[in-house]
Image (cartoon, helix red, strand yellow):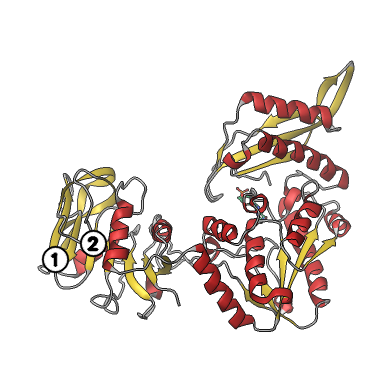
Amino acid sequence: MHEKILILDFGSQYTQLIGRRIRELNIYSEIIPWNKAPELDESVKGVILSGSPFSVRDEKSPTPDLDRYRGNVPMLAVCFGAQYIAQNYGGSVEASNTREYGRAHLATINTESRLLQGMTEGSQVWMSHADTIQSIGDDYRLICSTNDVKYAGFESTTDETFAIQFHPEVYHSEEGTKLLENFTVKICGCAQDWTPQSFIDETVGKLKDKIGNDKVVLGLSGGVDSSVAAVLLHQAIGKNLYCIFVDNGLLRKNEFEDVLQSYQDMGLNVKGVRAANRFYSALAGISDPEGKRKAIGKTFIEIFDDEANQISDVKFLGQGTIYPDVIESVSATGGPSATIKSHHNVGGLPDFMKLEVVEPLRLLFKDEVRRVGRALGIKQSILGRHPFPGPGLGIRILGDITEDKVRILQEVDHIWINGLKAHDLYDDVWQAGAILLPVQSVGVMGDERTYEQAVALRAVSSTDGMTADWCHLPYEFLGKVSNEIINKVKGINRVVYDISSKPPATIEWE
Ligand code: XMP
């Protein structure tokens, strides 16, 4: 078991950020809802208490039992955590007259504190709190203040417990990483040896132990997550990994052949299944977005099940699930939220498949998956791909789907994506795609009047797809692509560019 920092989540919007900052220091961290706090074991080198939307003065506010940790491992309490320590260990917390929110500067620093070593007076920190710590217990000493907040930081004189009112995990806290490094490396003694290679070695070892000589079946999508999951499983069990890559007739131009070829080059045992017609039949006449998603998901499952049944004695189902999909977060209304996001590109697999699930990436964030993929030698053309929805072009053709519409959209998408690549814009864009609109408009080509369809181009910047902004691409480039599309793709005489952000719009149109 790799050594780790345990992060107890009290529902702060920044909790995931704490996890990421620690991992960026090559130290493994895990986020656990506060009321599921585990017993201490020897893998835990330190505990961090997160912030929270709650006030410690609130009746319903979290009441973690810290006794199992305090005095046994170092603890860093952030924001709400710091207030909880003050309030419950001899100090007091009051509502402050003004919300202390945004930039502040550390006016005094006690550099004898091991937590603050190497930090400089005047350093900018990020505050976000409504309550103020009025006093701290007798067994605590003040270690830093801002002009407005006296107890910006304090530490225990009897054990290795540290508390700070500001958020070191936020980029605006200039020396936040230094503080987190002091805590994890100097105080907790973490070895900083959690690297992509160590993750690969440990994961492959665990997969070998778990799977033994049994068989695993895995659906590949052409995307980063399923590809990295497949290569890890392949390293562990070789030919006992059976991959299935389905052409649902809604992929991009040449995608089936190109991606299948890359998988074969990677040495994977992959079966390509051409099933476009089955999907088109299932979709015939359906124009409602959710109806289309359901039809696509159901058809995928039928095909996947048929294929899996052709391989005898399969025991496991491999999936490319990643950390944000499984992380349990504490909701703002109290307790861990009831729903854990379950995200399967294939729309979920039914119980009748009776396969045990293996998810080698379930503890990694997306950028970590990419780093592991790089260490595994996976090609940049797969690692750097824009996200592409499971239902593919099916939810980018507004209204019902026909083979002809798919062909038109594939041509448009091909020009759009190749244009971005040719102008070195592809990697600056988080996701791009084209949408076929159910709109006809009048145009003129040569001496002839045309009455053809319109297409929308979409390119967004984002970090996780939850929020997004439209990309401000150069006009000349957009003009060039628009011309090329109208000249080359029969059936299209008008191109528009989508300038909506998410929210209030979404990335996909359906
Ligand atoms: P929206 O449109 O909700 O999309 O802003 C956010 C991200 O999710 C992708 N997306 C999907 N992915 N199945 C998927 O696997 C789906 O049904 C689906 N719908 C949207 C979308 O492409 C974007 O990356």
Q: Is residue 267 left or right of residue 185?
A: right
Report the front residue among 215 and 142.
215
**Other residues around mark 2 within 10 Å, as few (<14) / some (14–19) / many (≥20):** many
Q: What residue type is labelled 2?
A: Ala
Report the front residue among 131 and 1.
1
Q: Looking at the image, which residue is at 75% across and 60% down?
A: 265
Q: Toward which corner of the image does residue 455 lie, by quadrant?
A: top right
Q: Toward which corner of the image does residue 405 lie, by quadrant?
A: top right
Q: Looking at the image, which residue is at 75% across and 36% down?
A: 415
Determine if the C-beta at disc 2 is less than 8 A from ligand 1: no
Q: Name the residue under label 1.
A: 140
Could you say where residue 282 lies in the image, as x and y percent from the top left? Answer: 84, 58
Could you say where residue 205 lies in the image, as x and y percent from the top left? Answer: 56, 77
Q: Looking at the image, which residue is at 65% across and 23% down?
A: 476
Could you say where residue 234 lies in the image, as x and y percent from the top left? Answer: 67, 71
Q: Is residue 306 left or right of residue 344?
A: right
Residue 499 in view of the camera: yes
Could you say where residue 276 lies in the image, as x and y percent from the top left? Answer: 85, 56
* First-in-chain label (1 vs 2): 1
Q: What residue type is labelled 1?
A: Tyr
Determine if the C-beta at disc 1 is less than 8 A from ligand 1: no
Mark number displayed over residue 163 = 2
Residue lying at the far left of the rendered structure: 138
Work out which quarter of the rendered image holds the N terminus and state it: bottom left
**Other residues around mark 1 within 10 Å, as few (<14) / some (14–19) / many (≥20):** many
Residue 83 in view of the camera: no
